[in-house]
Amino acid sequence: MHVRAELFIKNQFNTFNDSLIFSYMPDNELSIHEFRTSAKRIKTIKKFLKTFHSGWDVAGYYNKAKIGITTKAGGKVREMAIDHGIILRFENEINDTYSELTEWIGLKEIDAEQNFKECWIDYPHDELFLLEFIILNIFKRIRLRTLVTEFDKFIISRLLKIRKLIRAGKLKEQLHYSRKLIKDIKYSLEFRGLRSKYFGNKRLTHHRITLIEDKIGLWHDWMVFTADLEEFLREMNFTDEKRLSRYGFLMERSHANLLAVENSAVNLVKNQFSYILS
C-alpha cells in the first residue's frame, strides 16, 4: 500500500479517537466536529471496500466500533446548537422572545448531551483499534495502481447516481441521499490525494465539491429546525391567539427559508454537476 494512503487511514482513526476523548468537555464543539468528520471519512473507506471487493465487507467490525452510533449522538448535540442559533436570529428580527421554545430546545439539548455522554463513557476503543488494524491490512494487499483505479470507479459510480437523479427530476426529493453521495466523492478525492484535479478533469475539484456540500448542509440545518419546531408545536398545543400568532409567524418564516435554501441547493447541484459531467 502507498505510504500516503496508510498515513491517511491512520490519521482518520487517530483524529476520531483523540477528538472523541476531548469531545465531552467544555467548549467541545470543535472536537465534536473533528471526530464526526473523521468518522465520515472512515465510513467512506468502509463503503469503498465493500464496493471494491464483496469479501472485504468490514461492516461488522465497523458496527462493533460504534462509529455510526457515536457520530449520530454527537450530531444531535450539534443540531441543538444550530436550533439555538436560528432562534436568536428570529428573536432579533422581530424584537420578541420565544422563551417556551428556547426552554424546550434546552431540554432536548440536555437529553442529547446525556445520550452522547453515555456513548462517550462506554465507547469501545479496543474495537476501534481492531477496525483500523483490519482496514490497514486489507489495503496492504492492494497495489497502488489498482487502488487509484478502483477509487476512480467508486467516484464515477457516485457521479452517475447523481446524474441519474438529475435526469429523472428526483434531485429535490432525494437531496439527503445526494448529500451522502457528494460526501463519498469529497472524501474519496481526499483519500486519492487529488484536491485540484480528477484524472485530467479539472472541473471536479475538492473545493467545488465542498461548496456544494456546504450549501446542502445549510438546507439540512433548516430542515432540522423546521422539524423540531413542528414537534414543539404539536407537544405544546397552544390555544391563545398571541402564541399562535407568534409561532405561526415563526413557522411561516422557517418554511420559507427552508424552501429558499432547498431550491438554491438543488439549482447549485444541477448546475455544478452539469458542468462537471459535460
Image: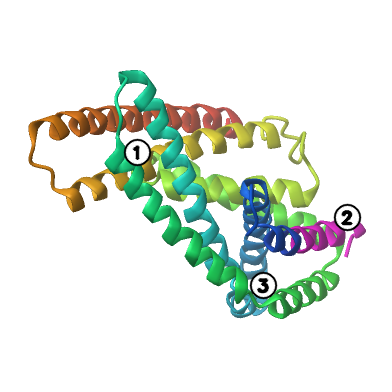
Query: Picture coordinates of residue 132 (x, y %)?
Result: 76, 72
Residue 115 visible somewhere in the drawing: yes
Q: Residue at x 65, y 66 (%)?
A: 46
Residue 113 or residue 260, whichever sits in front: 113
Residue under pointer 3: 53
Count the marks.
Answer: 3
Query: Picture coordinates of residue 23 (x, y %)?
Result: 65, 57
Q: Which mark is residue 180?
A: none
Farthest residue toward the right?
3
Q: Quadrant of the C terminus?
A: top right
In the figure, is residue 53 to the left or right of 273? right
Query: Picture coordinates of residue 97 (x, y %)?
Result: 30, 30
Q: Give SS at disc 2.
A: helix
Q: Quadrant of the N terminus?
A: bottom right
Q: Residue at x 34, y 38 (%)?
A: 169
Residue under pointer 1: 169
Task: Name the amino acid, label 1.
Answer: Gly
Q: Is mark 3 in CB contact (under 8 Å) with mark 1?
A: no
Quadrant assignment, res 170: top left
- Indicate which label's residue lies in the foreground, 3 or 2: 2
Q: Magenta includes 162?
A: no
Classify 161 as above or below 267.
Answer: below
Segment colored magenta? 1-15
Q: Residues within 10 Å of mark 1 (few under 14, many from 20)?
A: few
Between marks 3 and 1, how big is the CA–CA gap?
32 Å
Task: Name the amino acid, label 2.
Answer: Arg
Task: Name the amino acid, label 3.
Answer: His
Sooner in the amino-acid sequence: mark 3 or mark 2: 2
Sooner in the amino-acid sequence: mark 3 or mark 1: 3
Residue under pointer 2: 4
